[in-house]
Amino acid sequence: MTGGENVTPQKIRRIILEQSKRAGVGHIGSALSVADIVAALYANVLRISDPDDPDRDRFILSKGHAALALYAALFLRGWLTEEGLNTFCGDGSLLGVHPEHALRGVDFCTGSLGHGVAMGVGAALAARLQQSSLRVFVLVSDAECNEGSLWEAAAFAAHHGLANLTVLVDLNGQQALGYTRDVLDMSPLAGRWRAFGWDVTDVDGHDAPAIASAVAGLNSASGPPHVLIARTTFGKGVSFMENQIKWHYWPMTDGEYELALHEVDQTP
Amino acid sequence: MRRAVVKALVELAECDPRILLLTGDLGYLVVEPFSERFPARFINVGVAEQNMIGVATGLAEAGFIPFVYSIVTFASLRPYEFIRNGPILHRFPVRILGVGGGVEYGHNGASHYGLEDVGVMRVQPGITVIAPADHEQARTAVRKTWDLPGPAYYRLGKDDESTVPGLAGRFELGRLEVIREGADLLFITMGSIAGTVAAAAESLAGDGVSCSVAVVASLNPAPVADLREILGRFPLVLTVEAHYLVGGVGSLVSEVIADSGLACRIVRCGIRSTPDGVSGSQAYLHEVHGLSAPKLADTAREALAALDNARSTGG
């Protein structure tokens, strides 16, 4: 298990369900929402020969509460053992609900929303100063765009023309306590990013090949930074979780778990 | 201190390409020696301190040693959570330069005062916290700590002219510096108010009160062993800081006294109340808050008298 070909959305979804059930924790819907994006990144986008290689592409899961999707990808790439994966949310584990830098393969600690883009900007600026061709990818939630600090970082990245930086927005329209249009409407999100000077691409966030293809078409050498507005469905792949607010935090019953696994297994 | 530190940074940056300087659009006529010598290694991030710390975190992950520059409160409080979740949790060598401790920005008002920065930084075990007393000590401190593995916070004064008598630029991480020896009373201070404390001690000497004065510039790691030793030799200590009473050097000394079971009595001198909107020079505000040399000398006399009284009544 070393290549990206092993990383598929279906495998990531299965691991999300298995681990969240085993640990009895929530954030399932948020992780399912980004399964295809994370699969696209770890299968076909990120140039990482080794998680310790200084010239590797950087990935920041700024919406840290979807960490299970990241752990699944690290496992499927062979950078995390099955034994390690199975410690998720256990006492003494490095695999908590939000990712920790101490875990090999996690470039930056996240969990507090609005932090990841700024660190990604620093990583992208560092690459420029070091004349490295590495690229930096930051996955944010749409609700995270409520955070003013994100827009500080967005302004800086555009001003400095950090073409090696790509932000992916998981546009699922939900946040912890409600739908984003009701809580704090940030639409039109693409327009806001464009107004900040970013190159904006709209993409189906559940079409992993399309996501990889969109990234492949970006100019990471010069020009503005890039944002992919990835249209997603919260809880994607499990019908009774899709677009349901309660699955931001809710853990599964045994019956729900069986049904969820069945649905994920039926969808390649 | 700020110019001395920038000068030291220029010298260090000549030898180490990892050093960068970021500013939150502050430091006019201060940062230019660096920005002109190393334009590609100087970044004005604009008025966005959270982003500045986040960017520095990303730079440090890639192997740089970024120094970030702003006024104390904008450097420490506005991006505090970014400092905690960034350089501290990642153990990255980001250097935060906060300028204008206490009420140095006098007429600029309360928004510009740095009254709790040492306190909020000192509660984090993972960050070195340094508050030099003058520009010579600031220079030494930066030259001795710039390449520490984890993050560091420096509380810098604006004064690049005066020096604290007896200090001679000495600094050791985790140590205190004794700048005056005396037998009756111990002053312990931090930051640029040390010069005022030295003046108070001098004035008390004229009245026959012999004072020791110790400067704590290394707040984290704290000079616990040094404090324990010196506090054990005095019945009374006055701590003096341009900082709220809680969290700074007065708190530190109280902790050491309590932890070590020492008999030394403590009187903490610092800012006791939220600024009330009254503007004024630093000297005026120090007077208002009991931190001028004459007021400190008065407090010392009262504390000694109270101690004598307590002894004579068996208290």
Image (cartoon, grey):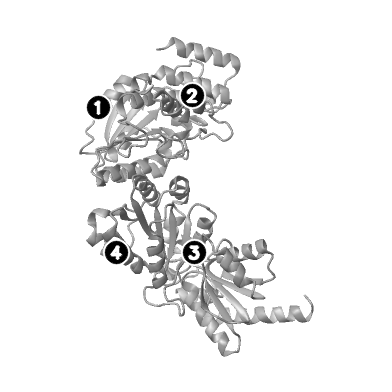
Q: Describe the element under mark 1 as helix, strand or loop.
A: helix
At 44% across and 28% down in the image, what residue appears? A80
Figure check: B259 above or below A127: below
SS state under label 4? helix
For label 1, count other residues whose C-alpha is less than 10 Å away and answer few (under 14), some (14-19) or many (20+): few
Q: Closer to the observer: label 1 or label 3? A: 3
Q: Which residue is mark 3?
A: B218
Name the residue at the left extreme.
A222
Is the residue at mark 3 from the same chain as the one at mark 4? yes
Q: Which circle, 4 or 2, is nearer the viewer?
A: 2
| Residue B307 in sight in this render | yes
> What amino acid type should be assigned to the residue bearing mark 3?
Ser
Q: Are marks 1 and 3 in contact (CB under 8 Å)?
A: no
Q: Which residue is mark 4?
A: B11
Q: Are marks 1 and 3 on the same chain?
A: no
Q: Nearer the viewer, residue A10 or A76?
A: A76
Which chain does the numbered disc 4 sit on? B
Q: In the drawing, does residue A221 fall left or right of residue A185?
A: left
Q: CA distance from mark 3 to mark 4?
A: 23 Å
Query: Residue A141: x, y in percent?
Result: 41, 32
Label 1 belongs to which residue?
A: A216
Q: Chain of mark 1?
A: A
Estimate the x, y position of residue A22 in percent, counting from the top left.
57, 22
